[in-house]
Image: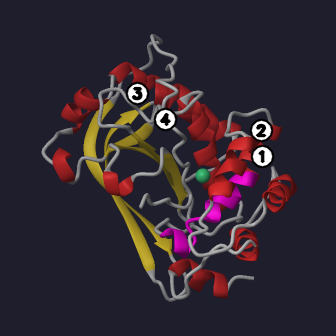
Amino acid sequence: MKLQSPFSQTRPAPGSGRAPFRSKMRVKGPEQVKPLQHRLKFSVGLSGGRQTLQFETQETIAGTRNSYDIQDGDLSGLTSFEFRNRFLPTEELEVFVSQDVLPWLRRLRLNLREFFIQFVPERPFGGGFLGRGVCTANRRALLVMEFTNWMPGHLALEVPDDVSTIVPHELMHIRDVLDGLSPAMYPAALPAQGAWIDLLRHLWIDGYLEQNGLPGMKKATRLAELEVGPYQNAEKPSSKQLENVVEEWWGNPMTLKQAIDLGLRLGFPLESNCPIADWYANAR
Ligand SMILES: [Zn+2]
């Protein structure tokens, strides 16, 4: 089963080829810094306690601390320098950080205390996302970008348009936390535990991006994802019903609670005694 993480951009069908980076522009090179450990803490439910997302940053590009996920698996012996040589053309990475990510922080008006980027090779158990934006209650945020296929220079590029399509979307998940639409909750859920929530919240996020002339996933794509849905044990809503849901919510701010309300009305499964159900039981 392919896990679908909440708060993530799910992977579209492959085959569109590699999107171009705007390359060849010189930007200031990465600055090696002393590796620093960071811990982002999240509340999960009321009795679910806390989750900690731990990572190490190894270098700075354009003032942003970057992390290469080399802490476990086959990569654990690599230095950050070796990691970059193996996976990332230096110039592309610099352009990506300084031109594809940082301007979006301002454009989407993200007022953050700290911002990190983590580059993660695709792993079988972590599949199902291209990027992920997480943010703590005290405005420390992490943008995770996934490589595909562990291939040099393949930075989450199986998308039809540009990797820039992913970035604003993920930053919107961060903004949702800043704006109070979603509590800061580090994602860890199986489909029956509410991993479908983002299928609904994407209607708001991508609708907002589209309505503001910003890159994002198309309405038809999001509708198609809802058609597939998490309907293992539930009766599937009619296509008309799903179309109505998409029309109603496209670009309309949706809180986490509203997403769960809506999903339950559509018959999506939500296990009891999971962190999301625990949170929902006490949400107003
Ligand atoms: Zn998303």
As drawn, 48 above or below 67: below
Q: CA distance from mark 2 to mark 1?
A: 5 Å
Q: CA distance from mark 4 to mark 1?
A: 23 Å
Dot placed on the residue nearer the N-terminal end, 4 or 1: 4
Asked whether, in this view, residue 44 is left or right of residue 125, the answer is right
Front tag of 3 and 2: 2
Q: Pick the quarter of the image with the N terminus.
A: bottom left
Pointers 4 and 1 in contact (C-beta within 8 Å): no
Q: Quadrant of residue 268?
A: bottom right
Q: CA distance from mark 3 to mark 1?
A: 29 Å
The residue pinned by badge 1 equals 207
* Few, some or many residues within 10 Å of mark 3 (<14, 14–19, 20+): many
Residue type at mark 3?
Leu
Dot placed on the residue nearer the N-terminal end, 4 or 2: 4
Residue 134 among magenta residues: no
Front tag of 4 and 3: 4
**Magenta stretch secondary structure, dominant:** helix
Pointers 2 and 1 in contact (C-beta within 8 Å): yes
Front tag of 3 and 1: 1
Query: What stretch of residues is rendered in magenta?
Result: 190-203
User: Secondary structure under badge 1?
Assistant: helix
Return the residue nearer the eye: 162 or 192: 192
The residue pinned by badge 4 equals 14
* Few, some or many residues within 10 Å of mark 1 (<14, 14–19, 20+): many
User: Secondary structure under badge 2?
Assistant: helix
Q: Residue at x 61, y 35 (%)?
A: 165
The residue pinned by badge 3 equals 93
Q: Position of residue 41 (x, y in %)?
A: 45, 69
Q: CA distance from mark 3 to mark 2?
A: 26 Å
